[in-house]
């Protein structure tokens, strides 16, 4: 089968984040199953990402050369009226936008309008979690519950690369990986670090990723006097990311909105225990994680401290995650994708 992927998401991990990773890994897995995948991507770069996405869609046109067209998120909304067009939502933009503010919220709201048109016009709609399916029905008025095809990870490749990039630290290390948006609640992690200052000697919080909230978060970190505790790594190479997972004692995701959360799969594949918010799709994706009430720094700190004090529990949660993540291995999920679009 010849499959066309439509996406204006930048095809690199620094700007495309988890959306890029999910699309890229799915394409490779489908190709290994004998299918052909071709990308239609944005070629014009504009200073405002939403304008870039609109421009990309403005010049999209249908093609009879493919058996299936898959538009990701809002991309493809203008050409979706075809029985072979699939709208695949990596997240629900309308849900994400409500946790943001200012220009970010305004531009995401515009994208959400286009995404709604996309799911209304497409022959089928896919989401990555039950949570995202509920939000798609809530915000876009879908009558039928969309098919769930979760995010995926190439476990064989991931684990091979983890072995090639060993790292360790004498300090107790907590890792965050993600784009620095308001909904990720990195500020809650910073405030939890203050609460933990006298409880965990030598605590180190390592934060991977960039984004619109980076300047404000850096200021907050300085105000909280966390210069010796928090390490801001920004966008990193894949090799460095693998080393960071190896170095970490636990992975922390305090986010209040996740349509899925590929970073959770990465942490599980690295057999790392997870501390996260009891919010959005997180309990669904990582039911074995140590979950804390969202937006409560003290609750997050208590969960981190509990794992710090129990290496046995950390090992057990890491092992549980390593087993749970097997269901998200790329070949399995690629087959689920093919069943959903058949």
Image (spheres, rainbow, N blue to C red):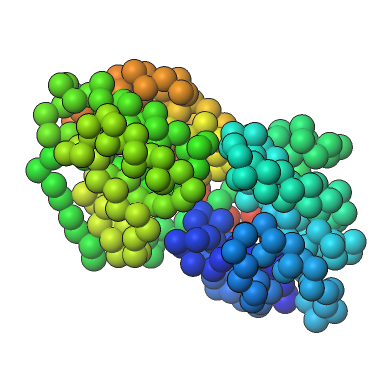
Q: Is residue 91 visible?
A: yes
Question: In the drawing, does residue 108 fall left or right of residue 200?
Answer: right
Residue nearest the observer in this picture, 156 or 73: 73
Residue at 72% across, 69% down: 56
Numbered-mark total: 0
Q: Quadrant of the C terminus?
A: bottom right
Q: Quadrant of the N terminus?
A: bottom right
Residue nearest the observer in this picture, 145 or 206: 206
Q: Position of residue 285 (x, y in %)?
A: 51, 38
Question: In the drawing, does residue 24 fall left or right of residue 154?
Answer: right
Q: Is residue 172 visible?
A: no
Residue at 81% across, 59% down: 77
159 w.r.t. 270: above or below: below
The answer to which quarter of the image holds residue 140 is: top right
Residue at 74% across, 39% down: 136
Residue at 34% across, 34% down: 220
Q: Position of residue 85 (x, y in %)?
A: 81, 62
The answer to which quarter of the image holds residue 275 is: top left
Q: Position of residue 338 (x, y in %)?
A: 69, 60
Question: In the drawing, does residue 63 fall left or right of residue 266?
Answer: right
Q: Position of residue 201 (x, y in %)?
A: 11, 29
207 w.r.t. 50: above or below: above
């Amino acid at each position: 089968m010849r499959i066309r992927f439509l996406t204006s998401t930048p095809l690199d991990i620094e700007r495309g984040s988890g959306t890029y990773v999910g699309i890229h890994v799915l394409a490779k897995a489908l190709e290994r199953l004998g299918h052909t995948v071709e990308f239609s991507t944005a070629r014009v770069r504009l200073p405002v990402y939403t304008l870039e996405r609109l421009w990309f869609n403005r010049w999209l046109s249908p093609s009879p050369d493919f058996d299936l067209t898959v538009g990701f998120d809002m991309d493809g909304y203008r050409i979706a009226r075809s029985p072979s067009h699939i709208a695949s939502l990596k997240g629900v933009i309308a849900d994400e936008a409500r946790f943001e503010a200012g220009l970010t919220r305004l531009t995401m709201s515009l994208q959400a309008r286009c995404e709604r048109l996309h799911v209304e016009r497409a022959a089928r709609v896919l989401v990555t979690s039950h949570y995202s399916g509920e939000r798609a029905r809530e915000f876009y008025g879908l009558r039928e519950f969309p098919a769930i095809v979760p995010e995926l990870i190439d476990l064989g490749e991931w684990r091979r690369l983890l072995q090639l990039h060993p790292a360790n630290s004498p300090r107790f290390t907590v890792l965050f990986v993600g784009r620095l948006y308001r909904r990720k609640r990195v500020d809650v992690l910073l405030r939890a670090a203050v609460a933990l200052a006298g409880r965990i000697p030598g605590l180190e919080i390592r934060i991977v990723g960039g984004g619109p909230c980076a300047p404000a978060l850096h200021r907050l970190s300085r105000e909280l006097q966390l210069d010796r505790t928090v390490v801001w790594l920004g966008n990193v190479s894949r090799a460095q990311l693998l080393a960071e997972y190896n170095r970490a004692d636990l992975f922390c995701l305090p986010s209040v909105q996740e349509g899925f959360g590929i970073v959770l799969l990465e942490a599980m594949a690295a057999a790392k225990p997870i501390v996260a918010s009891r919010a959005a799709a997180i309990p669904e994706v990582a039911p074995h994680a140590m979950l804390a009430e969202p937006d409560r720094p003290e609750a997050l700190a208590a969960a981190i401290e509990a794992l710090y004090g129990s290496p046995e529990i950390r090992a057990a949660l890491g092992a549980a995650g390593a087993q749970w993540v097997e269901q998200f291995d790329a070949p399995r999920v690629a087959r689920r994708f093919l069943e959903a679009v058949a």
